[in-house]
Image (cartoon, grey):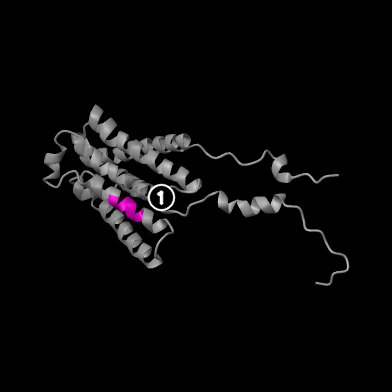
């Protein structure tokens, strides 16, 4: 009677995940993230906050959707063995600072130092991503992580100044706004760590699969090793 192969009886090889699904989920999460972060921006601007089809849905939600989709693609690539140059996707958060520049009038404000928060958030996210990605020299990741986290705290601490006193951490609403800003940047940074993480692939599964399917070696009676 022939032995049953446990590997083939369970349906063969495990199906590979699809890239489109990872991109779609990432884009959805990115848009959700941006919608929440927009609430923090409303707190900063107060009654001066305005919404428009292009600035809101392209410059902010669209940019975050692209970033989320690219990070979702990075997660798919990481789980399927990697691809050449795929780690450049770690720079995708920069889209959050670059796409809003296409909104009419933004460049004029940028020359006055207004509207640079998106670029700052993107750079901080890349720094956090590198620090928590687990690749590279430990001391360098530690230094960059400390600098990035300090920048997050400083950015949130400037909220009362940026809002011209409209937001106060001594009030529940102001404390909520600060918490929203802090956690939003940290979540973006942790998502950006995906392209820095170790690649997973089928090679890591081969020893386990082989050990399950290979027959046990016959025992030699009378041997004393």
Residue on which disc 1 sits = 195
User: From the viewer's perspective, is 147 left or right of 78?
Assistant: left
Magenta range is: 123-128
Q: Nearer the viewer, residue 32 or 167?
A: 32
Quadrant of the image occupied by residue 106: top left
Q: For mark 1, does the 10 Å Cα neighbourhood hold few (<14), some (14 to 19), or many (20 or more) residues?
A: many
User: From the viewer's perspective, is 205 left or right of 94?
Assistant: right
Q: Position of residue 32 (x, y in %)?
A: 38, 36
Residue at 23% in and 38% down = 100
Q: Position of residue 85 (x, y in %)?
A: 38, 49
Does residue 79 sit above or below 127 in this rendering? above
User: From the viewer's perspective, is 52 left or right of 185?
Assistant: left
Quadrant of the image occupied by residue 62: top left
Q: How many marks?
A: 1
Q: Quadrant of the N terminus?
A: top right
- Can residue 126 be found in the magenta stretch? yes
Does residue 224 sit above or below 166 in this rendering? below
């Amino acid at each position: 009677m022939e032995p049953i192969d446990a590997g083939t009886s369970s349906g063969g090889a495990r199906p590979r995940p699809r890239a489109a699904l990872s991109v779609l989920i990432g884009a959805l999460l990115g848009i959700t993230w941006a919608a929440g972060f927009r609430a923090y921006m409303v707190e900063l601007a107060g009654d001066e906050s305005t919404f428009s089809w292009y600035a809101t849905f392209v410059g902010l939600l669209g940019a975050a959707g692209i970033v989320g989709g690219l990070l979702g693609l990075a997660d798919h690539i990481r789980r399927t063995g990697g691809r050449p140059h795929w780690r450049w996707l770690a720079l995708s958060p920069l889209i959050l600072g670059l796409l809003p520049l296409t909104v009419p009038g933004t460049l004029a404000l940028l020359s006055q130092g207004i509207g640079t928060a998106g670029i700052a958030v993107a750079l901080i996210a890349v720094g956090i991503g590198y620090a928590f990605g687990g690749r590279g020299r430990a001391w360098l990741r530690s230094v960059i992580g400390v600098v990035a986290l300090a920048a997050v705290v400083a950015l949130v601490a400037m909220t009362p100044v940026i809002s011209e006193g409209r937001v106060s951490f001594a009030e529940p609403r102001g404390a909520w706004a600060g918490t929203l800003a802090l956690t939003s940047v940290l979540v973006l940074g942790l998502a950006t760590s995906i392209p820095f993480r170790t690649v997973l692939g089928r090679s890591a599964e081969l020893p386990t699969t082989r050990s399950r399917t290979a027959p046990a070696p016959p025992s030699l009676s009378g041997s004393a090793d």
